[in-house]
Image (cartoon, rainbow, N blue to C red):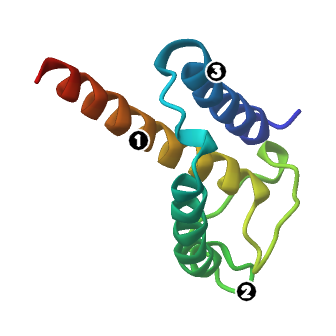
Amino acid sequence: MPEYTATAIVAALAVVALELAVLHTGLLRTPEYWITLGISYVFMIGVDGWLTKRSAPIVLYRASATTGWRFPWDIPVEDYLFAFALLTLAMLLWDAAARRERARA
């Protein structure tokens, strides 16, 4: 399996495992989370599409490190997994911290 693909899959699974095994925020079950993720992806598609377009790329990926699958506008599918992992981790940690703060009050 290509390196970037494997890392992206592991990152996404690790974040979900953190939520299910440790944090238990319930965030992944809320419509607000999925709406936020969708809004973030809309902006990501515009920016990432511009950065990775094959006609004049700013960011280059080693062909052997990815699956080569790109959608839409030449965005490597692995970028969606990393975006999921990073955005979800930030929201989970924020939610967990807010819960701890409320419990202290």
Residue furthest to the top: 21
Residue, disc 2: 55
Quadrant in which residue 59 is drawn? bottom right
Residue, disc 3: 17
Q: Secondary structure at mark 2?
A: loop
Expressed as whole percent of the image width and height from the top left, the position of residue 35 reads 57, 64
Mark 1 closeness class: few <14, some 14–19, many ≥20 residues within 10 Å = few
Mark before the other along the chain sequence, 2 or 1: 2
In 3D space, how far apart are the residues under numbered discs 1 and 3 (Cα atoms)? Answer: 14 Å
Q: In percent of the image, x 77 and y 74: which residue is there? A: 74
Q: Is residue 5 left or right of 36 when viewed as pictured?
A: right
Q: Amino acid at mark 1?
A: Ala
Q: Secondary structure at mark 3?
A: helix
Expressed as whole percent of the image width and height from the top left, the position of residue 40 reads 52, 67
Residue, disc 1: 90
Q: Depth-wise, is mark 2 or mark 1 nearer the camera?
A: 1
Expressed as whole percent of the image width and height from the top left, the position of residue 73 reads 75, 80
In 3D space, how far apart are the residues under numbered discs 2 and 3 (Cα atoms)? Answer: 38 Å
Q: Is residue 32 left or right of 11 when viewed as pictured?
A: left
Q: Amino acid at mark 3?
A: Ala
Q: Where 24 falls versus 69 (above or below)? A: above
Q: Secondary structure at mark 1?
A: helix
Q: In percent of the image, x 54 and y 33: which residue is there? A: 26
Q: Is residue 27 left or right of 20 when viewed as pictured?
A: left
Mark before the other along the chain sequence, 2 or 3: 3
Q: Where 6 falls versus 55 (above or below)? A: above
- Image quarter in which the C terminus is found: top left
Q: Where 50 falls versus 80 (above or below)? A: below
Mark before the other along the chain sequence, 1 or 3: 3
